Image: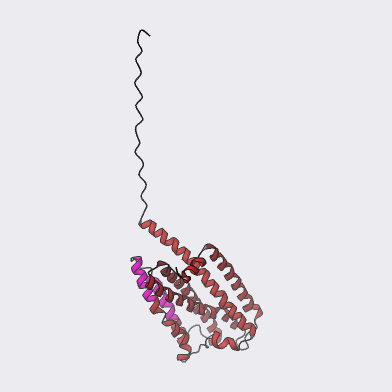
Amino acid sequence: MSTAERMMGRLTARRGEKVLGLLAAAGVIATAVLGLWVTPPDADEGNVFRIIYVHVPSAWLAYLSFFIVFAASVAYLATKRIRWDRLAAASAEVGVLFIGLTLVLGSIWAKPTWGIWWTWDPRLTTTAVLFLIYVGYLAVRRLPDSPAKRARWSAAIGIVAFVDVPIVHLSVTWWRSQHQAPALLHVAPRMAASMAAGLLVGVAAFTLLYAYLVTFRLRVGRLEDRAISEALSPRLEPRSAPVEPPPTPPAPKEVSARG
């Protein structure tokens, strides 16, 4: 068993899942405190800028989720171990959640800053395409087919779909875009110390939240697989042992009249 598999086994145990849940909750609370009360408002955008402490971590964790799908898909094709297929499926579901949250938060941020909810900006368009690609990936995983064949097709799609992730990230530099440059690489170094700290804490908190959601989904996936295998291969009831007839009682002895 590889080091990655042993680490995944420890994290997906019930104790590891509880620890991740507590750390994720603490991180989200710390992000909320820093983002809403500790950090100052932006000089240009005011308080609406505070949405960055959730929007940027959501986008980065979507990238991470889809990278894990890519890596787990490669591992499955190389080893044919079902645990990697389960990891790819769980990470894709969480990634779709994060990329959907990114689009919603981006639209909320765009309204007061750009004056519109949506525009066909290169960053927004490629992000929407990324969302649809992985929704399609999850749809393929629901097709009624043999588990091995479905896992192979899903792994192939998970590898090819990851090509859109660097396109999304670099779209603001490849094409003219209203969207700002990547925040962690370009904006964070020029932020106030408290604002940069709030952004980094948000990324760490969402990373822990991602790990918790994936471990929880992996446990649910194992239970689903067990239920399906039991439904397809019902156990036969054990045959009852044949009942032996009771022994025949001995005939009574005849008593002589003479006594």
In the rendered image, the vertical position of residue 134 relative to residue 119, given as above or below? above
Question: Which residue is farthest bottom?
Answer: 176
Of residues 94 and 236, which is closer to you in this image? 236
Residue 58 % position (x, y): 52, 77
Quick check: is 143 in the magenta stretch? yes
In the rendered image, the vertical position of residue 123 relative to residue 84, given as above or below? below
Residue 20 % position (x, y): 56, 68
In the rendered image, the vertical position of residue 86 relative to residue 238, given as above or below? below
Number of numbered labels in the structure image: 0
Q: In which quarter of the image is residue 18?
A: bottom right
Of residues 47 and 91, which is closer to you in this image? 91
Q: Is residue 123 left or right of residue 113?
A: left
Residue 52 % position (x, y): 57, 81
Q: Quadrant of residue 199?
A: bottom right
Residue beneath the point at 58% across and 86% down = 188
Q: Quarter holding the N terminus? A: bottom left
Is residue 121 in view from this perspective? Answer: no
Of residues 118 and 52, which is closer to you in this image? 52
Q: Main secondary structure of the magenta part?
A: helix
State which region is magenta: 128-157
Q: In this view, does 195 lie to the left or right of 9?
A: right
In the rendered image, the vertical position of residue 1 relative to residue 70, given as above or below? above
Residue beneath the point at 40% across and 67% down = 82
Q: Which colour scheme is used?
A: secondary structure
Residue 131 % position (x, y): 44, 78
Is residue 126 in view from this perspective? Answer: yes
Residue beneath the point at 52% across and 72% down = 210
Q: Quarter holding the C terminus? A: top left
